[in-house]
Amino acid sequence: MKKMLALALAVLMAVCVFAGCAQEAENVLTMGTNAAFPPYEMVDENNKIIGIDAEIAEAVAAKLGMKLEIKDMAFDSLITAVSSGAIDVALAGMTVTEERKESVNFSDTYATGIQVVIVKEDSEIKTIDDLEGKKIGVQSGTTGDIYCSDSPENGGYGEDAVARYDNGALAVQALANGQVDCVVIDNEPAKAFVAANEGLKILETEFAIEDYAAAIAKENTELLESFNKALSELKAEGKLDEIIGKYIKAE
Ligand code: GLN
């Protein structure tokens, strides 16, 4: 009887070790994001990164037979992290731009973003035309930052007009404290920030309409192809709409 027990224990241990190894050997897809961009990415009460991008990446990874690992980092270090191979892919409500395309490849787009302007409810800023001479809060390295800090000849307001913050929440806090006159940021996080802070509103006039896509290293064409294939399957299956619909309720 004792022998049988010892044998059973040995088998059990062997299985555990084997399973452990198998898990180690499983392919890992490393995604980078900036988890302060609701509802695309945010941290839940258990410190888990959730949101549209996390779920899309999870679904893509499942299709590729890979295990997803998410790394939280500053938005403006994501492109370098992708091109240096520190992460496999960046999903961060990231807008496809010509400049970024010089450093990384973008997947097919999976969502649309709109740059909007957040102001205090009693602000004298009524439309985008009133931004002239105002202090504009932005999230460092985002398209909102790039447009606004551009020279007036290029449709921007110049470097001095812009105050940069590490994330959108800090920019919105600066607005609430009166350190900036407005914040230019993507519409969905804007809605979330306005809902969470009293006395703020989003201007009706939109700043720019953009496409979101995943960034992948130039040389990793294999992942680009398999990512796009998985993404188009998710679109066809209605899974993509389902994920987006879970976080963004139709108005
Ligand atoms: N869509 C914007 C950009 O790509 C902002 C993204 C973000 O802040 N996560 O620059």
Image (cartoon, rainbow, N blue to C red):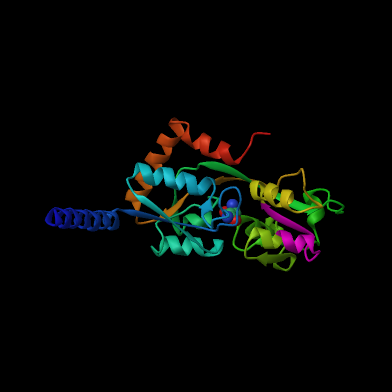
Residue at image position (50%, 43%) is: 109
Q: Is residue 150 visible?
A: no
Q: How many marks?
A: 0
Q: Position of residue 98 (x, y in %)?
A: 52, 53
Q: In this view of the protein, which residue sits in the foreground, 187 or 26?
A: 26
Q: Specify whether residue 87 is painted magenta.
A: no
Quadrant of the image containing the C terminus = top right
- Give residue 171's quadrant in the image: bottom right
Q: Is residue 135 left or right of residue 12?
A: right
Residue at image position (65%, 56%) is: 144
Residue 187, placed above or below residue 36: above
Q: In this view of the protein, which residue sits in the foreground, 185 or 24?
A: 24
Q: In this view of the protein, which residue sits in the foreground, 33 or 100?
A: 33
Q: Is residue 155 visible?
A: yes
Residue at image position (60%, 57%) is: 36
Q: Position of residue 149 (x, y in %)?
A: 68, 62
Residue at image position (61%, 40%) is: 248
Q: Position of residue 64 (x, y in %)?
A: 34, 45
Q: Position of residue 111 (x, y in %)?
A: 55, 42
Q: Specify whether residue 179 is painted magenta.
A: yes
Residue 59, placed above or below residue 182: above
The single residue placed furthest to the front in the displayed view is 1
Q: Is residue 28 left or right of residue 170?
A: left
Q: Is residue 134 left or right of residue 93?
A: right
Ligand 1's quadrant is: bottom right
Magenta extent: 172-185
Residue 10, placed above or below residue 241: below
Q: Is residue 103 left or right of residue 36?
A: left
